[in-house]
Structures are given as structure tokens and as C-alpha cells.
Image (tube, grey):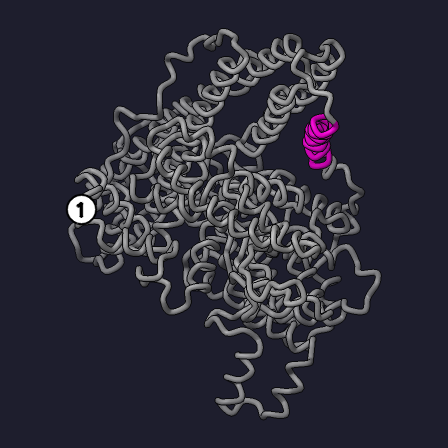
Amino acid sequence: MEIKEIPKGQVIFESGQKINAFHLIAKGTVEVIYPGGKYLLHGGDILGLCELDRDDSYVGYRAVDDVSLIEYPMEEGKPAESVFSNTETLKYFMASLFRQLYEMFRQYKQLESECETLYGNLSKKYGYYIDMCTKFQMEPTELEGQEGVSGFFLEEGLPFWMMGYYVSLKKIMVSWDYEHENHDFVYGFFTKAGEDLRTIIDTCYELYEYKNNVHNFILNEKGVDIFGRLLSLYEKAALKYGSRTDDIVEFRNNLAELLMQLRTQGFGGCPFYQERLLSCKEKMKEIEQRSQAGPEEKEEVETAEDNTSGEKKLSEAFTQEEEEEDLTLLPQLSWGELSGSLRTIMDYAKCESNLETSFIDHIQSYKAVANKNGTEEEVRLLRQRITKEFCDVYTCAFRNSIEDENIPVILKMFFNFGYVDEELAGEKNALFLSGIAGHLPTSPERGVYTFYEWLLAVYKGEKEPSRNEFDLDYPAFLVEQRKTGKITKEEEKELLEDNMAKVNYELENVFPLINKLTFGRITTFCPVFSEHNVMKGLDAMLVSARNIAKILADIQSKDYAAYYRETMFTAPERGIDKEFIHVEILPDFILTPNVGNRGVMWQEIEGKKRTTPARMFSSIFQMEELATIVTRLTGEFRWEMCKRMQGARWNDLSERSLTSEYFDYIQFYRKNSELSPTVKEKIKNDMGRAKNSFKEMFIMDYITWMLYESSGSPRLNKVSRSIMFNYCTFTRGIREKLKANPMYQELAERYEIRMGQKRHRVENICQKLRSTGKPIPEEIEKEREFLSM
């Protein structure tokens, strides 16, 4: 067997090049390149498995760093008999083939999801364009070739059973006797798996082409796209009706929102995106100067204020975009200043010597692992040890930082991002983190914290510790500790007042689990910041208080009562003994120090008080679309808050509530005469996707309600829609638009009758107070406003 040394950056094989041997990677990383995508191979992986049963390279291979390859002969596109005579070598071939199949399955599912989402975005944006043309009485124009773009569909997609087949086959192969079983099976497996691997690659390329095609209709370099059509329509409408009329201001604001959304939908990386952004700003300024006030412009102060706020919103939208771009321009440490980051962190933390030595050794070992997501026992145990020690080091460092007014930048990076080593993070990422470490886009006063800021709030007594995984809050946890004899009653009293003990509780009982959950990939979780987890630009993934506020505002513009709770108000001195009112309490968002893809709705209230904020967690660098995550968390919050309010009777239909009606609907859907057989079959399939969880099923329906039904696109069945309309009611503006559709008309009318009765009751209270000369309490005034939303 020949060993080849390949220098960094060299192409090993080009697609179509003759290939007569397989190569096992002894050292280094190799990039596999196919049209439209790529993936990485690490130590122990095999080059040439895509070429099984072929004599030319189906994909390209390039050395990412210096690579050592062990050559194995190929006979008619299959491993030579010498491979089968060595059990360990054969295992390498099998394991690498499974890994490459799994990676391509992952890319296939991701591309499939992106195509569906992108086409949905195109349809939604073009539908909005048509609506605006109708509104402003102008003729819409189609984009050239758009008629050829239909909904995402593959004529020959992957068989539905293929992924499950290989998952099960891998489990079977664990017990397969490599030494004594007939090798014909392996020959057959290699032939079939190699063919399937090429099929997946071809399908991914087809998806990639479709994605690019749709991508170009939304935004392209020439400007002949949906956004260009909308901007052109805005110009015509503004010049015709005046730029300060309500409809034009709303249209302008929506354009600004749209351009910002494009960034989160994958367009931010386009080289022409920033150019289009600046061009749009200049164009809008030009239109503003050219346009004159239209005949419908109102002179009332209220309208003038509305228009001013609309202009301000547009300005803020562009300012936000510019601020996000400027993150890369913040002052950064030099690469030399970042050198030895791990040593700096350990010197600051002042841990016990055995913990310090062990943590440093484990980080060095982790850096040396080629496949950090590997499932090998040794790698898995290494990640577990680092996870445990990371929390211990974090605790030590936090204690030393409490009174430190000049926390070093590297420690801020450690606290807020999980950063421990400059080489592990990668130069580009490490420099970026050093720039934003002192300019975090959070806002504790607005309820958005990094995890470090959250711990400080707990330490200062501003926030109570979170519940643990057994749903015990801090006082209940101490009671449990006392009952099991771990602490005395006197110690319990002391710990209740000890803020550092509360921080320790948060770090030991909440931090490890919540950090893992928000990371999303639980089996490969490791809490330290590593370059291999960064799939997008950090500036695009960074979660900010501004983004969260904007998303919450969008949710409130649809589901106005999402974060309102019912509470009791009394004012005996004004003759109000007991009146139920609604108050809005927005949730706290805590950003965990990782690059992840999940959000977690951890608890709906603090302790037992119902008018306290919910707690929601997200990775500080979020790979998924933040708006979708927050919408999902809002749906989960609605479910859990209703259960909290209803108590043990949350699913008792005799006491009607969101949870009791939805529970009854799902439990007895088979007997529901209002549902067709097709709808019942869909509910059955959806329950399978929701793993038979009533809450998950509701959340899925809530997301559909917010994304589609709010814009008049019916997706839910009649029963589910009725429940949503009653308990997650849209704002008045949306309700008025939906009334035109018979599906919503009766629901809207019933809702108005119920709200009218409640408003009448509040008006009677106000009238009674006026007649006695008593001022109307602010709480009652706000309730009147709430009932009119």
C-alpha cells in the first residue's frame, strides 16, 4: 500500500478524471465537490466511494489541509480482494460509505426544505405585488420566464424508504461477522450504495438548480426581479397619489421590511445585495423629492403623526441593516492578542489545579480530533468531559468577574459565546467575536439577556432562578433538598437569601441542559465555540434585542393577545370590588453561548405569580430563521399558559378554554362529522409528525395560523380554525379583511358579539364612575383599549 502526501489546497482528483484506486485518509481533511455543493471527509474516510462501479471520478476531491492518503487498489470499480482480506480496512470502507450517505441525505433534506421555503417566499411576494397593483389600480407585469416556475416538485425524487433503509442496515451491520460471512453481500452493498450515493448527488444538483432559478426571480444582479417590480410600482403609486398618504407610507414600510427579510432568507451573502440596498435608499429619497402630496392626504394632526412614525419606521429599518453591517467594523483584538486564549481564561478563573490541567488537556485533545461530530466512544466521552468541566470553569470565572469592572475581552468572549481557544474558533470567527464582545446587541432592560447578563441579574436579586428540569423552582428545590436530608432547615433559610447560591443553582441545574437543547444537535453537543459548527456568517446569525423586538411586534400585529394574561383588579375606593382585566407581559429572552438551531420555551411564569414574564432561550448565534422560532415559542407559551391558568381542569371541556377545546378536537376527531375522511387522514398523519403530542399538534397549527391564515390563505380545517379564531384572534384590521371570505365571516361576527358584550360591561363601569365624579382607573381604560383591538 502506497502512502501519498498531498499539500494543502491541491486538487487530488477532478470530476471526470480517470481513477484506479481508493484512498483512505490517514491525516487531514478532504473536500468533496459536486455541482451545487460540497462536503468534508476526515481521518478514516475513503476517497472513491462515489466512483464505485466506475473508472472515472464522479466528483472532485481537494485537500483542505496537508493530507496523507493510503492507496488501495481498485478492480473494475470495486475494492480489490486485498481489502476484503483485512477486516479493519473493510470496516473503514463500510463506515465511511455510511457517513457519506448520511451527509448527502442531510444535504438533500436541507435543500428540499430550502426549495419549498423559497418558492413559498416567491409566491407570497408575487401575491403581494398583485395585491398592491390591484389596490393602486395598475396593471401587473409578469417576470420573464416566471410561468415556468411551478411549486417545488421532483419527477424522480429519492424513494421514501431509502434513508430508513440505510439507517436500519447500519444497525444490522454492527453484528455482521466480517471475517466469516460471504463477501458477495459486501460487493452487492458497495455497488448499490455507490449507485445510491450518486443518485442523491444528482438529485441535490437538481434541487440546487431549482433553488437558483427561484432565487433569481426574487432578487438578481440586473434588478429584473420581484423586488424591482415592487419598487417600480411604489414609484408610480407615490407619484400618482402622493408619498404621504396612509397606503403609500404602509407600502414603503413593507418594502423596507421586505429588503431586510431577504437577508435572513439567504440573500445577504449575494455580492449585489448591499448594492441593491443602497440603490433602494437612494431611489426612495428621489421619489420622496419628486412626489407631491396626493389629494387624499389628511391635515389632521393624528394622520400627520402616523405618517411621521411611518417614515421613522422606514428609517429605523435601514438603520438596523446598516448597524448589522457595521458589526464587522467594530474594533477587534489582533490575532497576536488572542494567542493563548485558553491560558488567559484559566488564569482568570483560578480553578483547582486538577480541573485546570484536565480541562486544558481535554481541549487540546478535542482540537486534534478530525471529526468533532464523530460517534466513536472515545470522541463521545471527550465531549461529555469537556461539557462537565466547562460548567465548572464557567462558575469559577463568573465568581471572579462579579466585582471586576474591567473584564478582559477574552473572558467576555468566553462568557457570552463559549469561546476558549483561538485556533478552535478559527481566525476570522475569533476576531469577529473579539469585536462584538464589548458591544453586545442585547438589552436587559427590554428583557433580552446573554446568559452571563442573566446570571448577573440573578446575583443582583433582579431575577429569580429558573425552574430545573423537574419543574422545581428554587424554593421548591431547597424544600426537596431538606426533605432528603441534604440540608438542614437553617441552611435552607440561609440559601433562600444567598444570591451566589442562586447563581450556582442556575449554573448546575439549568445551564448544562438549556445550552445543549438550544444547540439542537444533542448527541454531538460540546459547549466550546468551534469553527466546525459555524455554517453561516456570524454577523448574519447573531440574535439581537432589536430583532427580537421586531419579531414580537410582528406577532402582536397578528395575534394581539398573545402575551396578555387575565388578572384581577380591585379599587374599593372607586366602587370596583373585583374586575378581571388583561395585562401584557412580554417574555424574557436569554441567549445561550453557542451556535445552535433551536429555541426553548422554558417556563411560562416566575414562581406562582401569573403576571411575571415567561422565559425563552435561544442560541446567541441562531442558524434557523429567528421569526419562525419565536412564533413557535409563542404558540408553546399560549398552550402552557392556558394549562397554568386552568390547572387540573386544563382538558375538561365543561370549562371551555384553548387547551380543553383543542384536546377534545384531537381526541375525538375520528367521530367528528364536520371533518371529511381526507381531513381525518391528514390529522392522523400530522399527529404522527407531532409524535402524538397534543401540544406539538397545536403548535404546528398555530404556526400555520400565523403564517398563512393571517394573510387569508386557508390551510386549517374548519374545527381547528374555529378554535384558533376564538382563542388566538387576529387584530381588528386582519379580521375586517378576512370577513370578505365566507370561511371567516361567521367566526368574525360571533367574535364581535362576544367582544361587544364585554365592552358593554366595561362601559357601564366607566359610566357609573363618571356619574359619581370619580376618575376612571388607568387599568380600566387599558381594558377598554384591549377589548377594541
Q: Is residue 632 above or below residue 230?
A: below
Residue 285 horizontal/vertical position (percent): 74, 17
Indicate whether residue 271 is drawn in magenta. Answer: no
Within 10 Å of the Cα at label 1, are there few (<14), some (14-19), or many (20+) other Cα atoms? few
Residue 361 horizontal/vertical position (percent): 61, 66
- Secondary structure of the residue carrying tag 1 is helix
Q: At 63% across and 50% down in the image, what residue appears?
A: 781
Q: At 53% across and 68% down in the image, what residue appears?
A: 385
Residue 718 horizontal/vertical position (percent): 29, 39
Q: At 46% across and 28% down in the image, what residue appears?
A: 737
The one nearer the camera, 700 or 785, is 785
Q: Which quadrant of the figure has residue 657?
A: bottom left
140 displayed left or right of 400: left
Q: Is residue 266 visible?
A: yes
Q: Is residue 151 above or below residue 142?
A: below
Indicate whether residue 311 is drawn in magenta. Answer: yes
The one nearer the camera, 233 or 319, is 233
Q: At 44% across and 59% down in the image, what residue appears?
A: 642
Q: Which quadrant of the figure has residue 650?
A: bottom left
Residue found at the very far right of the displayed protein: 405
Q: Which portion, as a residue range, is magenta?
A: 301-325
Residue 414 horizontal/vertical position (percent): 68, 58
Q: Which residue is mark 1?
A: 185
